[in-house]
Image: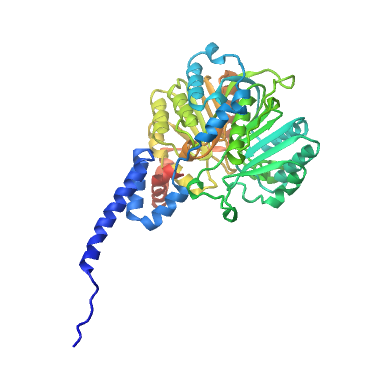
Amino acid sequence: MTPSREPRYPGAMWALIPVLETLWIVGIAIWILFERRSPVATIAWIMVLSLLPLVGLPVYLLLGPRRFKRRKLRHAAAQGAARRLGARAHEDLSRAAKEPARSLMALCEGAAGRPARPRRAEIEIYSAGREQYVALEQAIDEARHHVHMEYYIWQPDRIGIRIRNRLVERAKAGVEVRVLVDGFGSSKAPDLFWRSLREAGGRVERFNALNLSRLRWRPRLTNFRTHRKIAVIDGVVGFTGGMNITDVHTAEYSGAAAWRDTHLRLCGPAVRGLQMVFCEGWHYVTGCTLESRSYFPPPGERCGAQLPVQVVASGPDENSNAVHKLYVAAVSRAARRVLLTSAYFVPDRPLLTALVSAALRGVDVRILVPARSDLRIVGAASRSYYPDLIEMGVRVFEYGPAMLHAKTLVVDDAVAVVGTANADPRSFFLNFEVVVASYQPEVSDRLAGLFEADLASATEVTAASVEQAGIMRRLVQNAARPLSPML
């Protein structure tokens, strides 16, 4: 009788499994450790990738906060036209400033570089999309040399078509038109939408586009988006803030459901900062350096009274996290009031500590967030922080029923910030963002006035209302909280 054949070395094969698992865990741990992220995020990712490799690895490659090197871009931009021409001799505004403005100016310039040099600008604040879009369209119509626009979302809706058509007209008139849109946020505006602008001589590029047919998609960069909203006209007039190019921001098309947002118009030397930020992004996407002094002209006669401001940009290509440092440092110096408005509020430990510490020393700390977020998991994670904040004296208000999309910060009379960055890890560490910091009491008071007006459409969250939330709702909120570093 022929003996049955058994698999050769079955015991040895099974014995290899623990060895392979150990090698996998050690390799993953070394890989993550070299990423140099926060201790909590490091441990979390090591556990996920160790226990769920088949699920965790694809998620990490797609969504993990991988830093990517843009050193060549940084060097080229620093030595190229944007930094050479944009960094002309300027008035030293920080030397004349009082504390804590002087320290914050130095912090921002040290962290964000030359675009953050304090410069003067005429400031116009918009709290409604209708007025902001009218001002933007007027500025585009008056363009003589160039129009540069960088937006996270550009929808092919009525506002999107209106502004695109204006760009087409300027391009036909010989004005240089460059548009940079995010490959994910503006995915609903296909190449067909941009054909008329390209045919008129304008250029349209996508930031980190998903285009498998051209092999341009890089999984490690999928989670890095340009969340900026920038428009620069002739290097003299600039716009930035929370408003994208879409109907949802204006009551003209969305009625009472229009999103509440805040946007700025700048006119003057400070627009150089916005221009440098745009040129850097343009160089990253196209490899082209904009090498003309006409992109950084003198302010001329198009601007009125000007105040000192800083354009502060940040992104995952560097380790300074300038916007995050500005927020934490400003709140830490508060003596009288902190008024924070954020569409997505998921504070990390330093910001949470700064807010609570300010409240404990008697500062009026108030936070305004949307009652109903368009991203439910972010809204759930945000509410998980309410009990700790309220217990320590921070007051939280939920705005609604319309969506609140503004991103502003007012600290005493020392600094007022308006920009594209929310108070969450995505804005602070993953997205390319830009904010404008003003150091004049009148600007702080104007933003504080908008904050107080918004409270008329908001409801305060109290300890009692938190306790009244159902068990399932609190469970969902607490379950969403561990995801905070990735939201």
The structure residue drawn at horizontal position 57% and vertical position 14%, both measured from the top left corner, is 92
Is residue 239 or residue 67 the one in the foreground?
67
| Residue farthest to the top, as pictured | 96
- Determine whether, in the image, residue 306 is placed left or right of residue 362: right
Is residue 37 or residue 10 the one in the foreground?
10
Task: Please identify the quadrant where the N terminus is shown.
Answer: bottom left
Reply above or below: 341 against 27: above
Number of marks in the rendered image = 0
Q: Quadrant of residue 82?
A: top right
Question: Where is residue 382 drawn, in percent x and y?
Answer: 45, 42
The structure residue drawn at horizontal position 64% and vertical position 26%, both measured from the top left corner, is 271
Question: Where is residue 323 drawn, in percent x and y?
Answer: 50, 30
| Residue farthest to the bottom, as pictured | 1
The structure residue drawn at horizontal position 46% and vertical position 39%, both measured from the top left corner, is 425
Reply above or below: 69 against 114: below
Work out whether residue 135 can be spotted. Answer: no
Question: Where is residue 297 drawn, in percent x and y?
Answer: 69, 23
Reply above or below: 42 against 52: above
Question: Where is residue 320 drawn, in percent x and y?
Answer: 46, 30
